[in-house]
Every structure is written in C-alpha cells, then in structure tokens.
Amino acid sequence: MSKAESTLLDMGITLPEAPKPVAAYLPVRIAGGLAFVSGQIPMRDGVLLASGPVPSSVSPDDAATAARCCAINALAALREALGGDLDRITGVLRVGVFVASDVDFHGQPAIADAVSTLLVEVFGEAGRHARAAVGSVSLPLGATVEVEMVLELGG
Amino acid sequence: MSKAESTLLDMGITLPEAPKPVAAYLPVRIAGGLAFVSGQIPMRDGVLLASGPVPSSVSPDDAATAARCCAINALAALREALGGDLDRITGVLRVGVFVASDVDFHGQPAIADAVSTLLVEVFGEAGRHARAAVGSVSLPLGATVEVEMVLELGG
Amino acid sequence: MSKAESTLLDMGITLPEAPKPVAAYLPVRIAGGLAFVSGQIPMRDGVLLASGPVPSSVSPDDAATAARCCAINALAALREALGGDLDRITGVLRVGVFVASDVDFHGQPAIADAVSTLLVEVFGEAGRHARAAVGSVSLPLGATVEVEMVLELGG
C-alpha cells in the first residue's frame, strides 16, 4: 500500500472505488509528468452528498464536507489511474473549486479549504498548491461542489 | 492535409477560418509541448449560434450543437497556430466547458459530451481527456457555451 | 531590480507586498518550469477595491480597474515566489478571469482586457497568452473579479 493511502487510512479514510465519469471523458488524463483530474462531484456510494446552492439549500459546513468528498473521489480516481500507487504523485499543482452559490454567498474559500487541508494532510508540503475557488450558478447533477486538480508525477 | 483534418472532412466538417479573439489575447498559446486554447464561443460565420442560458433561452440539444461549434472553432484556431498541421497534436489533456445555465439546470455534462465526443472522433484514443463542466451565470457576448482546452504537442 | 519590475515602475505601478492567501493554499505553485498563480482578488492595502456583480453593483470601467489590480497582485505574488526576480518569467501561458456578473451582463472580455493589456505591457510578446473570461454568480469575499494565471519560467 502506498504511503499516501496508508496516511489516509490513519485519518480514517478508506478510498472508495474510483467514480465513473458521468459522461464521455476520462477521470484522469496523464501526460508529460502531469495528471489532470476531471471535475469531481460529492458522489458517495452512488448518492450525491449535497445538492443545491450554499447557503439556501446547503450550509457552509455541509458544503465543506461535500468538498472533502470531492477530494477523496479525486484521490480514488488517481489511485486507479496510477495502478494503485498514489506515491507516484510528487506534487499537487493547482486545485479548482466550484461552489454552487447564492448571489450573496462569498464564503467559497472556507469550503475550498476542506480540499486544501486534506491534500496537505495526505501529501505534506508536496500537497500545497495554487487554487482558484469561485461561485457557480449551478453544477452537474445539482452538485453543491465540483473539484478539479492538476498534479505532478514522478517515477 | 493532416489526418485529423481529413477525418473532420469525412465527418462532414470543414474547418472555418480561425476565429479572431474578441479581445487582447491569443487564440492559442504554445509553450513547452503544450497548447493552451482560449475560451471559444459558438460563433459561426460571424453569428453567435446560441445565446442565453439553458433551458430558458436555449434547449439542451441546441446547447450541445453550440458546444460542438465551440470545439470546431478551437480546432480551427489550433490549425492556424500549428501552421496547418493538426497532426502535431498528440493528445487532448483537459477541456473546460462553461454552460450558461439557469439556477435549476444541471445537465452540463450532456452538453459538454458534444465536445468530448467530437475530440475522440477526430483524434481517437489520444483525444480522450480530463474535463470540468460547470454552469455559468453569463458568458461573453451572451454565448450559451464557452470551451477552452489544453493539448499536448509532439514534433 | 528586474526589467519587468522596472517597466512596471515606468508605468507608475509599484508592486505591493504579496497578498496573503485567504485560506490554506499557496499564492504561487512552481513545478517543472511552470508557475501556477492562485486566484487573485482586487485587494489593495487590505481593502477590496470592488465588490458585487457588474453592472448592478460595479460599473464595467470600475471592474476593469479591479481586474488590473488582480493582475498586479498576481505579479506581486510572483515576485515573492521568484525571490524578487520577475525576469525569470519567460511567458504567460493562460489567464483565467472570473467576473461577478448579473445574468444579462456579457462584457467580460473588455474587463479581462485590463489584465491582458497589462501583461503585454510588462512582458512584451512573451506576455501574450490564452485566456478564458467567464461570468460568475459570486466570488470570494464578494470580489467583483478573480484572476488566475499559468506562466512559463526559465533559468
């Protein structure tokens, strides 16, 4: 088991099966030492963890939990794409976080922090990344959060 | 003629002249074996194919047609940037699809599929990519869809 | 002083201290000859220059000024990340501009031009880039504009 996955287990997180893309694309595209992870939504065991905008439909706290679920799904997709070895990840470069938001909601950074914090817990300093967090009028399947990533691979 | 462009012709698609950027930027920026394509809108022969949000102004089907037009414009921009040779493209890495959406519209993936499907038809397995599809409250010139891409170049 | 910073001074622009991230991420992530700059908002001297959507809360002209401020903050973050030497930047590759927009506002490109124009003034041809400008329903802290970048580094 990779060191990263072992760290996840210590944190009480068992990676799920890699989520299937909801359409005609790849969960992870690898090229030239980079891995591009498709936008992940907070799907767990086939159920959407949170749907609708913050805060009218979902509280900021629940949206943060959903964002963390997106990050876990991204790691699950990466594990599958990397033949089980998350330790090939040498750095997280960029994270994009889209938060379904009411017009007057401006707390996207705190929600995106759930993603950033998890990545640093799993990968240490190598997990520190650039980030763009923005509000979105609506997201696929009604998801409250969507998270995409670009990572650096070694080996 | 490049193999990719010949495939497009077989599909009944003649690439238009490369669209002019609507502002002070490049249609395609090439560096280090990567090509970044600027956000393309569904402009055809100088006319916007679809404007306004889905579904109140544009049906999902018409938005998918517009998304496909964005992808064709991206290929036209790439052809010009690559001196006519689309076969220098060795892979599509990431596609970003913004869909002007009403608050309760969640079908962005099906619209983005029109882009993904076209790219796989043109480039085969190399055309398979990571993707983020999100809703947007409004897009440049009122466009219904905007599509950007990152590709890998060889040669 | 770097040539780029000297050009900025000639333009009457003194780079501020690098903005602190509003959450758990890096202002700039460098890897493999690329620099990813986190989404910058128009914060100047600790005050948000423009908040709320265009045009109901902020005029397009004021939004363009705010976008320029975001670009200056990005350069300040880059200067710090590059040990003071902006001349390590050999190219601007992609700029993402999110504009808080009312549903019927479609002038995002003109606002994003304030960013693109500044980058070309500072870096010349190397500053020309691909770009995606989109509307957003709401942005962090209520900002009117958020700007992120990917750049190429030499040396």
Image (cartoon, coloured by chain):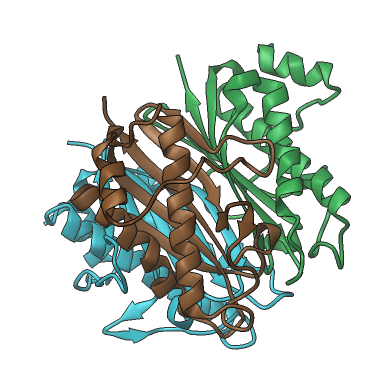
Chain colours: A green, B cyan, C brown
- Picture coordinates of residue B128, whole percent (x, y): 43, 46
Q: Identify the image quadrant of the N terminus of chain C.
A: top left
Q: Nearer the viewer, residue B90 or C2?
A: C2
Looking at the image, which is closer to me, A9 or A56?
A56
User: In the rendering, at what x and y percent does residue C133 appear?
Assistant: 45, 65
Q: Quadrant of residue A7?
A: top right
Nearest the viewer among C64 and B96 is C64
| Whether residue A38 is situated above or below residue A134 in the rendered picture | above
What's the residue at 42%, 66% (across, down)?
Answer: C112
At a point 38% along the width and 84% down the height, the residue shown is: B48
Residue B118 visible: no
Tell me the residue at 17%/60% (across/down). B80
What percent of the width, then of the height, locates residue C103?
61, 82
Q: Quadrant of residue C57?
A: bottom right
Please determine whether, in this image, residue B6 is positioned above or below residue A8.
Answer: below
Give the residue at x 47% y 58%: C69
Within the image, what quadrant is residue A92 found in?
top right
Taking the image as shown, residue C89 lies to the left or right of residue C24, namely left
Give the quadrant of the C terminus of chain C. top left
On the image, the x and y values in percent for residue C149 come to 43, 48
Say whether residue A13 is visible: yes
Q: Does residue A144 sit above or below B58 in this rendering?
A: above
Above or below, B102 against A3 in this view is below
